[in-house]
Image (cartoon, rainbow, N blue to C red):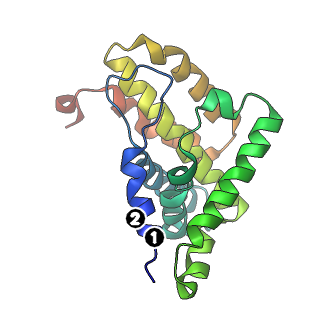
Amino acid sequence: MSKHYYAYISRMKNIFRWGLMKNNRQENLSEHSLEVAIVAHALAVIGNTRLNKNYNENYIAVCALFHDTSETITGDMPTPIKYYNPEIKNVYKEIEGIAEEKLLDMLPDDLKEEYRKYYNPDLNSKLLIKAADKISAYIKCIEETETGNKEFIEALASTEKAIHNMNVAEAEIFLKDFIPSFSLPLDSQN
């Protein structure tokens, strides 16, 4: 019997983010997930190296790769709708959980539990992934505003504020040390 998990995951490249806003460059879910994984890995390394934490940075990176795979079933729900009120947010989280279970059911039985752990990270890992997700959104806002897209000005400010409100030391270090480069032209980064 054919299993459809990887075919569904490959559809991430067909799901575009920021659907309610004019984009100078479209961003798909595959790109976003890769960036979140890279940033989450960096946050874990920062935590381990500079803050004496004990994160499993590779596990966190893999969890981040899978953090939005449920959207291959649900589609991308725009943030203003998803977080409009607590009731909608909670119902959407429940829908995401159902979609994740549906995806896991597309795997052979002997692989399900191995993948289940990537959908259910511990609280500390989940916090770093959420911070990385916000940082990825912040990077998108920087890229769009740097190309003159005024549509992202408010999102830039609110996303930066949301990152600070998370009170994640690793995210603050990443913002300070790495975000300024995202506003520089390539030739200035040498």
Query: Which residue of the protein is positioned furthest toward the front in this rendering?
Result: 1
Nearer the observer, 150 or 160: 150
| Amino acid identity at mark 2 | Ala
Name the image quarter holding residue 117: bottom right
| Element type at mark 1 | loop
| Element type at mark 2 | helix
Q: Which mark is residue 4?
A: 1
Neighbourhood count class around disc 2 (C-alpha, 10 Å): few under 14, some 14–19, many 20 upward: few
Nearer the observer, 1 or 79: 1
Q: Are marks 1 and 2 in contact (CB under 8 Å)?
A: yes
Q: Which mark is residue 7?
A: 2
Nearer the observer, 138 or 180: 138
In the displayed structure, would residue 36 be above or below residue 154?
Answer: below
Res. 68 in view:
no
In the displayed structure, would residue 179 be above or below residue 103?
Answer: above
In the displayed structure, would residue 133 be above or below residue 70?
Answer: above
